[in-house]
Image: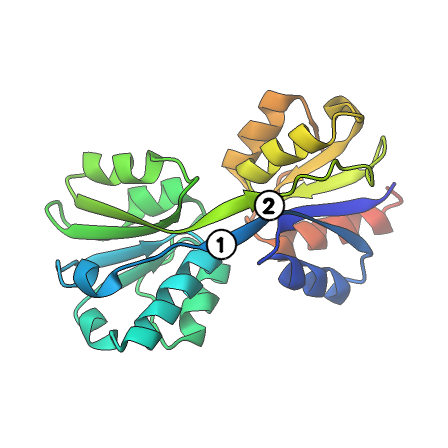
């Protein structure tokens, strides 16, 4: 029984490093490559926002690099920042952008439900082109004025996946990665693999496609996943 991590190119080095700290041999499958999209942040930020919401580390990085190269930090002085989880928080912190809010559970639904602001506030969401509209819809229902920018897009791997065999464990880093994996690994039945989805949305996609769920981490981070996998390994699984 081998362990694979199906991730994006941006996440791959981090996931590999975390796995090593837990003493686990994890094979990395890069299924998505991020590609920046052209942004006009100067004019966008001049619209005036109360909050900027980030849902991924790569989106945060792309935004921050644009802010730095354009000398736009002054346009963030009166803006609060929300990040979906620790990875996104770290990406912003590296560029000197402080984070005012992290949800208790690291999901976009929790972010939308718990954002500590009053109705009528202007919110900018920084997303991938492929990201669903649930976040923006939930924020709008709470009475926020929402504007979305797509900072990047995902380019899918095209080569079929032949590395994975029956009874292997596959960690899935997002619902889009689950769909991409299913498209590229048709020689292995989903029910013959053990899936470890990183969070609820990814779990839903795994369940829809028929994957066996080994477990869902209590905290939606790779650290939590590898901690539990190490415990299972030590227990003889």
- Locate the C terminus and report the quarter of the image it occupies: top right
Lower position in the chain sequence, tag 1 or tag 2: 1
Which residue bears the numbered disc 1? 35
For image coordinates 58% across by 45% down, the residue present is: 218
CA distance for labels 1 and 2: 18 Å
**Quarter containing the N terminus:** top right
Please tell me whether residue 26 is drawn above or below residue 67 in the rendered image: above
Question: Under tag 2, what secondary structure?
Answer: loop
Q: Which residue is drawn at 13% across and 60% down?
A: 48
The tally of labels here is 2
Q: Closer to the camera, 147 or 210?
A: 147
Asked if residue 201 is positioned above or below residue 2 in the image, the reply reads above
Q: Position of residue 6 (x, y in %)?
A: 67, 45
**Mark 2 neighbour class, 10 Å CA radius: few under 14, some 14 to 19, many 20 or more:** many
Q: Picture coordinates of residue 15 (x, y %)?
A: 66, 58
**Is 69 left, or right, of 227 in this rendering?**
left
Q: Which of marks 1 and 2 is in front?
A: 1
Q: In this view, does 161 lie to the left or right of 112?
A: right
Q: Nearer the viewer, residue 150 or 177?
A: 150
Residue located beneath label 2 in the image = 173
């Amino acid at each position: 029984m081998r362990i694979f991590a199906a991730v994006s190119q941006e996440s791959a080095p981090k996931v590999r490093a975390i796995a090593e700290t837990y003493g686990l041999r994890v094979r990395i499958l890069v299924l998505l490559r991020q590609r920046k999209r052209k942004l006009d942040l100067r004019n966008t930020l001049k619209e005036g926002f109360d909050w900027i919401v980030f849902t991924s580390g790569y989106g945060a990085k792309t935004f921050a690099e644009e802010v730095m190269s354009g000398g736009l930090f002054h346009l963030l002085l009166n803006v609060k920042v929300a990040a979906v989880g620790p990875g996104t928080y770290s990406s912003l912190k590296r560029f000197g952008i402080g984070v005012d809010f992290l949800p208790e559970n690291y999901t976009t639904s929790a972010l939308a439900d718990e954002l500590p602001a009053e109705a009528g506030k202007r919110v900018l969401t920084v997303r991938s082109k492929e990201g669903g509209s649930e976040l923006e819809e939930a924020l709008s229902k709470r009475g926020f004025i929402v504007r979305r920018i797509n900072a990047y897009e995902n380019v899918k791997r095209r080569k079929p996946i032949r590395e994975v065999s029956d009874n292997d464990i596959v960690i899935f880093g997002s619902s889009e990665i689950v769909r991409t994996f299913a498209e590229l690994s048709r020689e292995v039945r989903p029910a013959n693999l053990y899936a470890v989805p990183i969070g609820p949305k990814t779990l839903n996609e795994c369940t829809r496609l028929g994957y066996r769920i080994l477990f869902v981490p209590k905290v939606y981070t790779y650290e939590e996943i590898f901690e539990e996998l190490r415990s299972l390994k030590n227990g003889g699984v």
